[in-house]
Image (cartoon, rainbow, N blue to C red):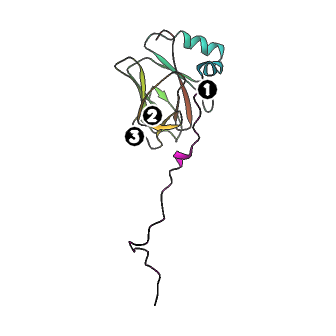
Amino acid sequence: MNDSKAPDDPAKPDLTSTIHLSALRSVPKPRPLEEIFSVLSLEEREIVSQLPQRSAMLIVIAGPNKGARFLIDSDETFIGRDPKSEIFLDDVTVSRKHAKISRTAQGDFQVVDLGSLNGSYLNAHQVQESRLAIGDEIQIGKFRLTYFKGRAN
C-alpha cells in the first residue's frame, strides 16, 4: 500500500509561492534638503533658485544622462521612449509612454505611471500616482531624476 499523498490532495498544503524581486530593493533613507542641494553644482543651484513660479525641474544627479535638466512648466509633461515626449529617455527599460508629471489643483506636481512595463518608482517605491516633494527621486527605467521646485513656489 502506498501512503504517499497525491500532489493535488487538499490535505497537503502547496508550498510554492511567487517572490516579487522589486520588493527586495533597498530603500534609501530620506536625505535632508541641505544634503540634496549640496550635490548640485553652483550653476544648478542658481538655476533651481530662479525657477519661475508654478514650475519645477528634474535633474539627473547620477547615472545615465548625469547633468541633464528638464523644466516642468506645463500642466502635463510626458516621460517616455517616444521621441515626441517632453522628457525623452532613450533606453529599452523605458516604455514609449511611461509616465507623466501633472500639476495638481493646488499647484503642486505629481508623478503618474501610464501603465508602463517596468513601473515608475518614487524614492525606491513603485507608485501609480504620487505627489512630489523637493528632493524626491523618480526612477524611470534606469534613469534617476531628482525633483526640485524653486523658492518662488
137 up-or-down from 56: above or below:
below
On residue 82, which mark appears? Answer: 2
| Residue bearing the label numbered 3 | 115
Identify which amino acid the numbered label 1 is placed on. Ile
Q: Point out residue 96 in the picture as x, y percentages from the top left corner.
A: 44, 37
| Residue bearing the label numbered 1 | 61
Circle 1 sits in a helix, a strand or a loop, which is it? loop
Kindly identify the residue that appears in the image at 59 percent across and 34 percent down. Answer: 28
Circle 3 sits in a helix, a strand or a loop, which is it? loop
Image-based side of 100 in relation to 63, left or right: left
Q: Assess whether mark 2 and mark 3 are in contact (beta carbons under 8 angstroms).
A: no
Q: Nearer the viewer, mark 2 or mark 1?
A: 1
142 up-or-down from 17: above or below:
above
Q: Assess whether mark 3 and mark 1 are in contact (beta carbons under 8 angstroms).
A: no
Magenta residues (range): 3-31
Circle 2 sits in a helix, a strand or a loop, which is it? loop
Identify which amino acid the numbered label 3 is placed on. Gly
Q: Point out residue 117 in the picture as x, y percentages from the top left corner.
A: 45, 44
Q: Point out residue 30 in the picture as x, y percentages from the top left corner.
A: 57, 28
Identify which amino acid the numbered label 2 is placed on. Asp
N-terminal label among 3 and 2: 2
